[in-house]
């Protein structure tokens, strides 16, 4: 049995492991981006200037994140909004966008069972999907 259709209200847990001297990692819940939204966002990102790209990614993240482990300087939960998403550490921000948009899986939870570990390793060992444009002579 499979469940690949993204129904309204469907959420998925996600995790990005910390990277020493780069970012603290993040645990989150998100609504996966629908294919139409992904294609529209990617098209806008391709044409946008750098400051507009950050705004587009910030909006996409704020629109799809449901919960996260991010806290402010007083260790209080930080609201998920466009401003906070635009100010995430760049490598973390980009990875989060790739996960929410369905381009890659998050990191494996520490409490994963053997089947989840096998599924994760199988999914992360697949080669990335690359679009191949046909040349006019073919």
Image (cartoon, rainbow, N blue to C red):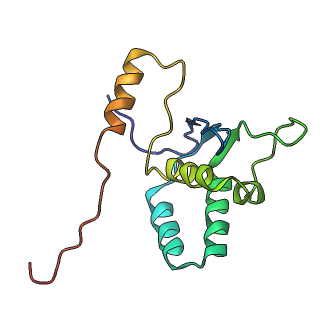
Q: Which image quarter is the N terminus in?
A: top left
Q: Tell me: residue 125, above or below residue 42.
A: above
Residue 105 location (% of width, % of height): 45, 41
Please report the residue visible at 62 percent of the width from the left and 38 percent of the height from the top: 20
Q: Nearer the viewer, residue 32 or 95?
A: 95
Please report the residue visible at 32 percent of the width from the left and 51 percent of the height from the top: 128
Residue 126 location (% of width, % of height): 29, 42
For this orientation, the residue located farthest to the front is 21
Q: Nearer the viewer, residue 114 or 19?
A: 19
Query: Residue 35 is drawn in which quadrant?
Result: bottom left
For this orientation, the residue located farthest to the left is 138
Q: Tell me: residue 20, above or below residue 92.
A: above
Q: Is residue 117 left or right of residue 49?
A: left
Count of residue discs: 0
Q: Nearer the viewer, residue 69 or 4?
A: 69
For this orientation, the residue located farthest to the bottom is 136
Q: Is residue 15 left or right of residue 105?
A: right
Q: Is residue 113 left or right of residue 125?
A: right
Residue 70 location (% of width, % of height): 75, 40
Q: Tell me: residue 44, above or below residue 75.
A: below
Residue 107 location (% of width, % of height): 50, 35
Q: Which image quarter is the C terminus in?
A: bottom left
């Amino acid at each position: 049995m499979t469940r690949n259709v993204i129904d309204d209200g469907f959420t998925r847990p996600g995790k990005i492991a910390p990277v020493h001297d780069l970012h603290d990692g993040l645990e989150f819940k998100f609504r996966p981006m629908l294919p139409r939204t992904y294609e529209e966002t990617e098209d806008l990102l391709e044409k946008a200037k750098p400051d507009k790209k950050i705004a587009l990614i910030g909006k996409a993240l704020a629109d799809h994140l449901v919960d996260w482990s991010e806290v402010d300087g007083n260790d209080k939960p930080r609201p998920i909004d466009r401003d906070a998403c635009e100010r995430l550490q760049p490598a973390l921000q980009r990875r989060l966008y790739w996960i929410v948009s369905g381009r890659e899986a998050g990191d494996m939870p520490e409490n994963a069972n053997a089947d989840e570990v096998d599924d994760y390793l199988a999914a992360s060992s697949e080669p990335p999907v690359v679009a191949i444009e046909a040349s006019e002579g073919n």
